[in-house]
Image: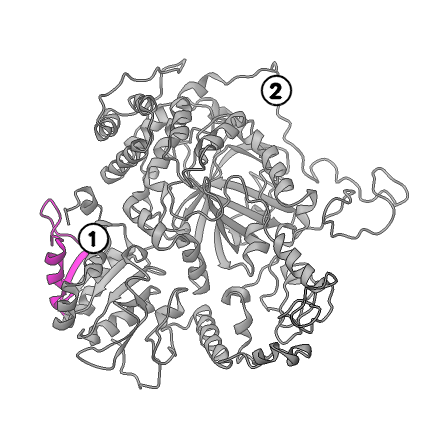
Amino acid sequence: MATKKNKNDGGDEGAGSILSTVSAPSTGSAPSTLQSKETQKQRLLEKMTAGQATAAGMPQNPTKGGEYGEPARTPQPGATVEPPSPLVGASTTSENIASAKVGKGVAPVAASPVADPLDRVRSDATGQTLTTNQGVQIADNQHSLKVGLRGPTALEDFILREKITHFDHERIPERVVHARGSAAHGYFEAYQDLSKVTRAAPFAAAGKQTPVFVRFSTVAGERGSTDTARDVRGFAVKFYTDEGNWDLVGNNIPVFFIQDAMKFPDLVHAVKPEPNNGIPQAASAHDTFWDFASLSPESVHMMLWTMSDRAIPRSYRMMQGFGVHSYRMVNAEGESVFVKFHWTPVAGTHSLVWDEAVKISGADPDFHRRDLWESIEAGAFPEWELALQIFTEEQAAGFGFDILDSTKLIPEELVPLTPVGKMVLNRNPDNFFAETEQVAFCVAHVVPGIDFSNDPLLQGRIHSYLDTQITRLGGVNFHEIPINSPVAPVYNNQRDGHHRQAIHRGRVAYEPNSLAGGSPAQAGYRRGFTTFPEHIVEDKVRGKAELFADHYSQARLFWQSQTTPEKQHIVKAFRFELSRVQTLAVRERVVSLLMNVADELAQGVAGGLGMPLPEAAPVLALQPLPSYEPSPALSLMNFPGDGSIKTRRVAILVANGVESEAIRGLYTKLLTEGAVPRLVGPLLGQVTPVDGDPLNVEVSVEAMPAVLYDAVIVSSGDAAVSTWMNDPDVMDFLRDQYRHGKPMLMLGGSSALLKQAGIPSALPDGSVDDALLMADSAGADAAFASFKTALAGFRQAKRDANAPKV
């Protein structure tokens, strides 16, 4: 229960606004506590409160009047305010987190230090004078150079030209795919010594930490598209190892649409906006994509994954990652095994529902980006466990499918996962463009101990990623951009090119040489990267191996492994996508492919499209299709997470006449558990409760609607309930919370709002809805335990399975 606070002491009221990046109370004192002793939260509180004080120190621009008439000829120095804390100038509170890449965790202030880590290029202008890019101090940054106060602008104004020209060239080409992304720094820590399997540096010893930079992304949309589109998500990890950079460039889905890189341009052209009209953006629900997919039966397995809830994750922090392809690991003796890479989030695998995803796109298109940023700022560092599927060539030969086929996965029942380490993201970038936008991931970036398989899609990616970075980042020297540079030393004879930064000593740029004493010399066999000497005796040929022709057995495995609500969502997703397709023959072809997966799937999709079932598409497999038992690991429901409610957003509805004692207590409990409570009112300002001091509304219903929260608590109080009864925005808020399966805690008489909103108090089958809780104000503390359990778990899917008409 919250303690009573002095009116001049902010207490923890408004603390949720410190933990958020949207809105803040317009009245009241700044909070003095976040109910946590965690360093990051204390730094965040200091940064936000000091920032408010700094801004308040300059209510007006005191030199603005000197910009007009005769005084403009002698511009004055710009006004400054001494910040009360160095954190005011910080991009992120997590700049204190250190690693071998980002530096010592001590931010440079009013300096641009030169060092090997990224600190060498961080620059801060606190208290400094404005200059040109050539270091010339600028006397006047308000006016161009004119002939007289009302005359033409002089061509000699090099300051204007530099500023405008640089502005005109600030944008670079966006990525063709994965254009929209978000990223963070962190580390990977190995659980054990894996030297028997690989000599790769990150796995050399138990407890060894390797700096990483991780970028999550959508695939189809452009840089300015929405975060919550139905799409594959990129999951790319750059390991800054002491033997060079290793880029594990994967997705949140373990398979792909195609089997050979030759088809990649066709796939991307098909899913991108149609070239005649540029429609639709960040969506596969159109004719050209489904035309391509319906004629490419190898895509069926991936179709089911992208139509599942995997394609609309709740958060980047709550999705799995996969290397997709089979890779090789090679030990110091040159012995090789095959591996598949799996990232599993500690927070569990949680998704959105489609109606929610669509509404979030309108309410906050930066939903995933904001979620990742806010979590790290508050010290709730996202974490994943890395596990390997390790198998030999002899095992692979007996699987019944081809491990070189990227449309196939290896069931965990066949090859269990071996946990090998954890990854923690603990620092936000200082600058989005310099780091997140300019980072260059490349499948060809491997280190000794990691090698490629002959997967024909992987082989094409080895070339494609390097080529696209050269175009996007202006030349072959993109590796010298600070975020891309390794922590391992670089010595070679590569020279020149656009934007070269290294200044090499000496006149030798070749090998062998004697003028430089033979340096730099090659490392020699097995000391440097040594490709695994796979023995191959084959003819050159264009084609696929026989087992690649099995397009349906693993699609059937995925379908059979889903829970009933997950299956319903897949059917609805197909129905939505194909309803937007205008070409009837394309719809029919897609359903004919689904006929080979499951009758209930094909019937559900065809029924929703108002069409009869077509004949099943031909099965092209040259051998009998293998059968599988359901694999629980393929369901999102298999990974509930660690039971924590950290970072969960909870709306607490308030209005005039609420009973505040229970609300204040629940607010404090949520903060203590690491959640992010927000007092949500009809408008910003204060609401007057029937007890205690006024409550400061943190955000309005219109600024952050229901879809932006994980749960809701509705306050008690007859006057407040009466107001909400006639508020359509509040009614919609409650309906969306219910429809989307989210926990709802109704205090006191607020339960009457359920009937007004058309929300039943029990599930459709008459059973108790354990995510719809009702308690009087005195029982709020007791109800919190059940509310917390519901908030930490999965959605109440039984509501969604038969949602009421509200």
* Magenta stretch, residue numbers: 747-776
- Location of mark 1 (residue): 738
Question: Label 2's element?
Answer: loop
Which one is in front in this view, the residue at disc 1 or the one at disc 2? 1
Question: Label 1's element?
Answer: helix
Residue 349 in percent (x, y) is at 35, 47
Comes first in the chain, label 1 or label 2: 2
Q: Is residue 777 left or right of residue 556?
A: left
Q: CA distance from mark 1 to mark 2?
A: 59 Å
Callout 1 amino acid? Tyr
**Is residue 288 in view from this perspective?**
yes
Number of disc labels: 2
The quarter holding residue 291 reads: top left
**Is residue 256 in view from this perspective?**
no
In this rendering, the answer to whether 717 lies above or below 645 is: below
Residue 631 in magenta stretch: no
Residue 45 in percent (x, y) is at 44, 73
Residue under the point 59% across and 34% down: 464
The quarter holding residue 626 reads: top left
Q: Nearer the viewer, residue 493 or 672?
A: 493
Residue under the point 51% across and 80% down: 58
Q: Is residue 570 left or right of residue 142?
A: left
Residue 34 in percent (x, y) is at 37, 73
Q: Where residue 717 is drawn, which disc sits there?
A: none
Callout 2 amino acid? Ile
